[in-house]
Image (spheres, helix red, strand yellow):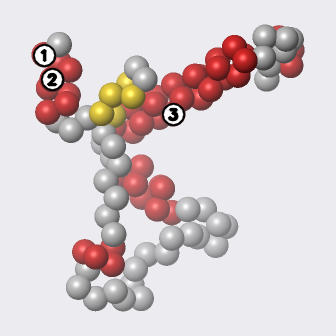
Amino acid sequence: MECDTARRDAGLVHRSSAWYAPPTIVDSEATSPVYSEATPPVYNEDGVDLTLIRWMLSLTPADRVATLQAHIDFVTLARESRRAREPHVRADEAR
């Protein structure tokens, strides 16, 4: 239990079976004195959301793994709940 307290004190949040640091959202307009054209683009020419890439790269490797594990846990939970609601689905259809 000491480990759990230390994790909470460090600002980590427990979701499902993983500890992760919640994302920090910063409003660039609120933090900069003057909003300029030099603000990095949100999307690149292919339509990729660069803010998500920048956010993930701002995390430590351990935080990245914890975040991705939380996403995996969510997908696993969603799949399991779907199977529980639809027991008539055959194994070859469960993809």
Q: Residues within 10 Å of mark 3 (few under 14, many from 20)?
A: some
Q: Which of 83 and 22 is in front in this view?
A: 83
Asked if residue 34 can be seen in this view, the reply is: yes
- Residue 43 relative to residue 80: left or right: left
Mark found first going from the N terminus, 3 or 2: 2
Please tell me how many numbered marks the rendered image carries: 3
Say whether disc 3 or disc 1 marks the residue closer to the N-terminus.
1
What is the x, y in percent for residue 41? 49, 75
Instruction: Using the numbered discs, state the Cα–Cα distance from disc 3 to disc 1 in whole angstroms.
Output: 26 Å
Disc 2 element: helix
List x then y, in percent, for residue 55: 40, 54
Q: Residue 39, located in which quarter of the rendered image?
A: bottom left
Quick one: label 1, few (<14), some, or many (20+) residues within 10 Å?
few
The three-letter amino acid code for the residue at tag 3 is His
Residue 94 lies in quadrant = top right
Q: Name the residue under label 2.
A: 5
Check contact, mark 3 vs mark 2: CB within 8 A: no
Tell me: 46 left or right of 77.
Answer: right
* Image point (28%, 88%), residue name: 34
Q: Position of residue 20 (x, y in %)?
A: 33, 34
What residue is shown with label 1?
Answer: 2
What kind of residue is marked 1? Glu
User: Which quadrant: the N terminus?
Assistant: top left
Up-down relation of residue 52 to residue 79 (above or below): below
Does the residue at mark 3 contact the one at mark 1 (Cβ under 8 Å)? no
The residue pinned by badge 3 equals 71
